[in-house]
Image (spheres, rainbow, N blue to C red):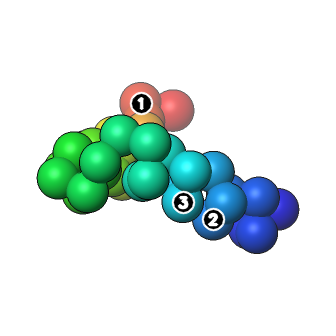
């Protein structure tokens, strides 16, 4: 599963461009963190 994720990230990285991927990746990680730790359950 991890290999598939790495490949997907690699494809996105080369398709969008180097300058866009880093902040997008950081925002995605931040959103995941909020969902994981900040959920109201």
Q: Nearer the viewer, residue 40 or 34?
A: 34
4 with respect to 38 (left or right): right
Residue 36 percent across, percent down from the top left: 47, 48
Q: Is residue 25 visible?
A: yes
How far across and how far down the image is residue 35, in percent?
42, 39
State the residue at coordinates (42%, 53%).
Answer: 13
Query: Which residue position holds label 3?
Result: 10
Q: x, y percentage for residue 32?
A: 42, 46
Q: Report crowding for label 1: few under 14, some 14 to 19, many 20 or more residues within 10 A (C-alpha).
A: few
Residue drawn at x 44%, y 42% as measured from the top left: 15
What is the CA distance from the residue labelled 3 to the residue labelled 1? 33 Å
Q: In the image, is residue 14 above or below residue 35?
A: below
Instruction: Determine which of the numbered discs, if any, sits on residue 31 in the image.
Output: none
Rendered location of residue 7, percent (x, y): 67, 60
Residue occupied by mark 2: 6
- Whole-Å distance between the Cαs marked 2 and 1? 30 Å
Q: Which residue is mark 1?
A: 40
| The N terminus lies in quadrant | bottom right
Pointer 2 and pointer 1: residues touching (CB < 8 Å)?
no
Foreground disc of the pair 3, 1? 3
Residues marked 3 and 2 touching at CB (< 8 Å): yes
Closer to the camera: disc 3 or disc 2?
A: 3
């Amino acid at each position: 599963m991890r290999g598939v994720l790495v490949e997907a990230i690699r494809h996105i990285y080369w398709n969008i461009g180097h300058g866009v991927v880093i902040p997008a990746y950081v925002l995605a990680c931040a959103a995941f963190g909020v969902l994981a730790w900040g959920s109201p359950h």
